[in-house]
Amino acid sequence: MIELYTWKTPNGRKVSIMLEECGLRYNVHPVDLGAREQHTPEFTALSPNNKIPVIVDSDGPDGRPITMMESGAILIYLAGKTGKFLPRSTRGKYKALEWLMFQMGHVGPMFGQLHVYIKLDEPVPYSLERYSKERYRLYGVLDRRLGEADYLAGEYSIADIATYPWVARHTVHKTDLTEYPNVKRWFDILSARPAVARGMAVPA
């Protein structure tokens, strides 16, 4: 059994989608970020960086429990554990990891910062403009890639699972997906996957 410590954020939902797609049994432990539960001593013991998500797998490597933080690392771990959603070919594997790092280093941080500045009562003009422009640039990168392949790594992988929850907030960062037809096609296909829908509903 896997214990999932998470909240209603894109990073948290990457892992719940992956768990659903892999068909793994898991228990959900909501960590209310608004109530700052991520800073309790109990959670800090699991996540030294005080960030969700975290998993505790009772059946870790060599049959011993393992605790893991950082959503990208968790996706790679679960792909290795199950043999799913990371291409088997060497070239395909590195392509999936390349686009996973693109999400981790660019899509998540930039969209996340834009969400902060959009919600401010008194937006900082420079910051709002900067992150707005970067949002458009990143959507352009995604759209060009998805014009070349059905999925980010060619086949459905952890790269798509990681990126989808951030694109799912396109209305929050005021982006019209019809302006990016390849992204919209990809988004609609993933939205129709039952495991994605279940994962996006965690925590209830």
Image (tube, helix red, strand yellow):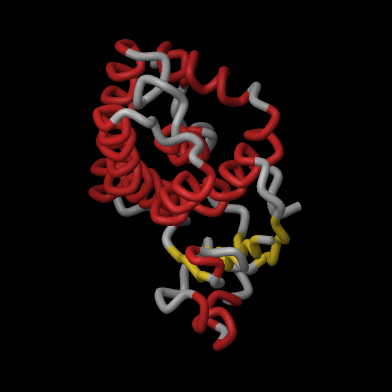
Rendered position, 4 above or below 115: below
98 to the left or right of 154: left
Q: Position of residue 160 (x, y in %)?
A: 44, 32
The residue positioned 55% from the left and 50% from the top of the image is 15
- Quarter holding the N terminus is bottom right
Describe residue 163's horizontal placement relative to residue 204 as left or right.
Answer: left
Q: Residue 181 appears in which quarter of the rendering?
A: top left
Residue 105 visible somewhere in the drawing: yes
In the rendered view, would you say 160 is above or below 17?
above
What residue sits 23% from the left and 48% below the top?
A: 126
| Residue 147 image point, x, y percent | 33, 11
Number of numbered discs present? 0
The answer to whether residue 200 shows anywhere in this view is no
Residue 80, position in %: x, y? 45, 47
Q: Quadrant of residue 100?
A: top left
Using residue 20 as the reference point, say whether residue 164 is left or right of it: left
The residue lying furthest to the front in this view is 62
Residue at image x 52%, y 23%?
187
* x, y percent for residue 98: 26, 37
Q: Is residue 85 above or below residue 30?
A: above
- Residue at horizontal 36 percent and vertical 25 percent from the top: 152
Which quadrant holds residue 32? bottom right
Q: Residue furthest bottom?
A: 41
